[in-house]
Amino acid sequence: MTGVLAALGLLTPGLAQAQSAPESLPPASNGIPGSPAPAGVNLSPEAPPTPPAPGGRAPSFGTSADPDAWVFRIGGRISGFGQVGFGRRPKDAPANRGTALHTPPLTVGRSPFWAGPGGALNFQYGTQTIQAFVSLEASLAGKEWQGYYASDHGPRIRTAYVALSPEPLGDLRLRFQVGAFPSNYGAPGPWGWGVFGPVLAIHGYGGTATANYDLSASKRLFLEYGVAAVPEVDEAQARGTYSDWPEAGLSTIVHHAHAGLSIQNKYFAKLHLARADGRNMRRFLDDDPKTVEVEHGRDGRMDVAALELRWVADPYGQLGVTPVYWNFKNALSVHDGIWWGLDWTAGGREMTNKFLGPQSNGTGQIAAVSTEYDFSLKRMLMHPRPFDGNGPDLRVALAFLPFWTLKSQDPSYDRSHGYYLGATFEHVMLSWLSASYQLYGESREGATVDVSGKAKRDQWTTYNATVGVILHSSWQSQDRLLLAYSRYFYSHFTDSNPTAPLDRDVLTLGGSVAF
Amino acid sequence: MRCDLVGLLALFALAAPAPALAQSKDEDAAPELPRLGLDPAEPSSRSAPPAMPFGVAPATSKDTALDFHGYLLLPMRLGVHEREVSAPGDSGTVLHTPPLIPQNYRRFQYTGVMPEPWLQLDLSYGNSTLAGTVVLASSAATEAESFYDPVRQLGISDAYVTLNLSKQLGIAFQLRAGAMHHRYGAMGAFDSGRYATPLFARINSIGETATTGFKAGSATIVLEQGIGGQLGRVPTGVPSAGWNDFGNPDAGASYVGHFHAGLGFAGLVQLGVHYASAWSQDDQNLSGTLQRGHINVLGADARLTAGRFGHLYAGISHTSASNAGAVSGIIEVLNARGGQGLVAEYLGPQSGGNGGLTTFGAQYDLSVARARFGDAYQGRNPDILFSAFTLGTKVQSDDESHDGVLKLKGGAEVTYSMASWFGVSGRFDHVRQDNARNRSAFTIYTARLLFHSNWRSRDEFALSYSHFVYGRQVYAERGYPPVDDPGSNPDKDALSLSVTFWW
């Protein structure tokens, strides 16, 4: 035994270093096997029901911890929005029927407001080197608010990850992040977002490794690689009963790589590449000739390539242009590992139904160019004097996103095209009062089948214009109370059901605060 | 009379200083809105005094404090799958997630080799005498999941109040009341062991637990007692379905009483005896035929905390069950939830819930550096960690096909922590689901690369590969609820990229 220990001890040579500084030794209960353990006959209810960390090196939850040098932060967002849509009288409705009120409104197209969950709490704990993040969300799920218990409104732990940022190696900074989190890329708007959001968003359990390297005082190189997996849902799960509508029997694994360059922190060019592989694990839903429209037994693939170009042209604002290309092969077998594609569209099935066509079998190609220009009028007018946002202003965002279905096996969608446009104006008049004007529109070629089975192609178009009044606590506060009126416009093809006409008028009252 | 008046005025004066003080300070403040009722955010009951310090464990604080802890285990898991039937366009070998492997936490087959998601946030508020604790937990982060599964979002999983009357009574005494779980027979020194399986029982109840302890010379005696029930039962007529975690309407309202005694010597050895009795005597089911059910556990364990010679745990227990199917998940034996879990995994469907388990387990952990250098080694240098572990149970059942079955599993892991940021590990596991049938046994070989931020850091980024060698009758679970699928072709290889971190 002594010989074995001595031999193994050769692998642990550096002890003298620790022995020379006994005054800095931590408390004895440090999780090393044989260390004193607290007296007791059971585990604390606070301890997790999990085995020790892989390998057993990291001290377990019950070990005493050094409370110094750790920082805890809590942030979040609270919101509540109510909307009422004013319905129109259906054709052939009884004459005594009055105006119908709808909540949620009976509309289609981009909504000017995103309420989000009722409350979100973000917990962060860690040091500059290691950080944990957990977000807890809850909404108004009860019967008091929804008319039934809407279990899919939470509460839920949504995002959780641990990030490791080692000490810089010269001009090279590394960051590793592992857990359950979304990664967003390619948005032409400021701060990585914008009116129509990212053209590539990835979610799942997985990780990313990121490197930033200063090529010179004015040039910085970005590199990132990531992998994520969305777990399979068993085929026997009854979809849509108490939860949303997941794809069953599919495993989706996403690989993504990114490279970028910034010059003078003004010019940015980033290339984003991603591939989502959907693995068809179906056994029962497969190859049933009676339900071929929903069951497709093939491995699938969805490839994305986007080039993000941004120019921060202070004081004239920021211009972003992101051309993006998607290639789909049997994409109905790809679940939502690629969480957002074109206009918040998730996964292979949604992208197929919306842009490739239901008869495409999920195979085809799409291209789009997401463009956005953002500016502050006051900042422009005051130039060269600075403007820090504390004063009256007109903040403007203009976005245009044309897209083309380059290739599809569905003849109704092959070589079709469409566009999204958005314009938001926020007139900040007083430290506590703003006016908001928003315009959103989308149009694309669509197809339907009439009673005789004949395919009919037409233009699916919807626009909405919104005016609103916003109250807030200071010039740049993250709180707002809002009252808005929206008017919707539809093409005949869009509002084509005479027995259930879409709402044209919508009132919104709500508020949100972020902290 | 005059003295009475002065005294009365003085009392009024004592009662009124706070508003006067507030008015003098708030002269410049915005006018206060008049109130006609309660604010929606106001609790229905009186709140405790405002929190002052943060990050101080209430148990060590004289002042009222808020304490916050958390734990994250987040893995990406991939299985390498050989497809049974490959259609044109499909690849024969696929990577998929989660792996199709026999690793159900509720069953004996579980080893903990392949990590599963677990997140929890612990919030405590109070002081050294009284503290309230709420635990928020989840076995999924919805951002990464295919769909929102409410069953895996546990919300508030534990909520209890701890009252420490040691000062008042002059003897260590703690009373804990509320909804909480206890695990007895933890095989690790600071955790529930490599198999994450308490040897005796896990008890999930709303009730109380009283703990006392005292010293007699170099001996320490710990006594613990608890009693509790569950908050409810599956209502009659509710179908067993995914949204209710496949609740069992034939399990009655259940209760549990438990008693434990521990005897420690010089911080070196701790001996314990444990007894828990869970029962149901409900009559509320559709057929009205619900009978009383019992699950009793009696066990003893020994823990050696031997400094440079490591940590050794060994224990043995006997579980006896009578009409166990009527007992709810108030008790978990070997992680099997309630009587239904016990019948499904151990006693067999023809047992009527009658039978027993004789269970034994042991775990030994050793730090080679500490063995060589003693307490001078504090974990800030290279080290080799060695762990060996085993668990077994012998089934006695009225179901002949399950009677006499001996289930065994064992393994060992060696971890070489070679740098402040890097280590490697190798693990071996062998599981015999029925010792008499080699074809139901399987072996797992696991290799890991471990990355971390420092010596003794509580974070671990692990890249793991496991290779499974199966007997001919080892099945993976599929379906909803998942059950053994003889047609399954379990993955032979599995990969995981995981992170663990706690504070």
Image: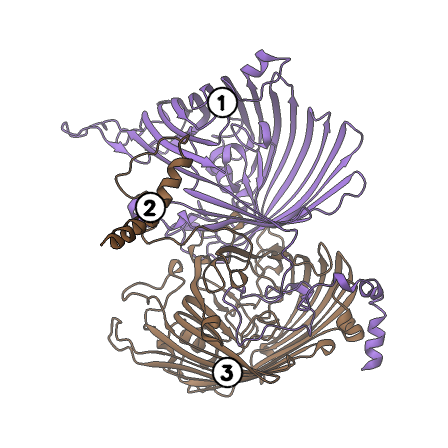
Chain colours: A purple, B brown
Q: Which numbered disc covers residue B16?
A: 2
Q: Which chain hosts label 3?
A: B
Q: Which numbered disc covers residue A421?
A: 1
| Foreground of the two, A259 or B338 | B338
Q: Which numbered disc covers residue B261?
A: 3
Picture residue at 33% right of the left edge, 47% below the top: B13
- Nearer mark to the viewer, of 3 and 2: 2
Against A396, residue B232 (above or below) is below
Q: Is residue B48 left or right of residue A368?
A: left
Q: Is residue B177 left or right of residue B3?
A: right
Is any atom of residue A437 visible in this view?
A: yes
Q: Residues within 10 Å of mark 3 (few under 14, many from 20)?
A: many
Residue type at mark 2 is Ala
| Foreground of the two, A467 or A419 | A467
Against B458, residue A336 (above or below) is above
Residue type at mark 1 is Leu
Q: Is residue A51 left or right of residue B374?
A: left
Against A74, residue B60 (above or below) is below
Q: Which chain hosts label 1?
A: A
Q: Position of residue B319 (x, y in %)?
A: 46, 84
Q: Which chain hosts label 2?
A: B
Do marks 1 and 3 share a chain? no
Dot 1 falls on a residue whose secondary structure is strand
**Residue at the extreme left of the image, as rendered:** A96
Q: Position of residue A304 (x, y in %)?
A: 62, 37
Do marks 1 and 2 share a chain? no
Which comes before the other along the chain, label 3 or label 2?
2
Q: Residues within 10 Å of mark 1 (few under 14, many from 20)?
A: many
Image quarter for residue B97?
Answer: bottom right
Picture residue at 46% right of the left edge, 49% below the top: A246
Q: Position of residue A446 (x, y in %)?
A: 44, 28
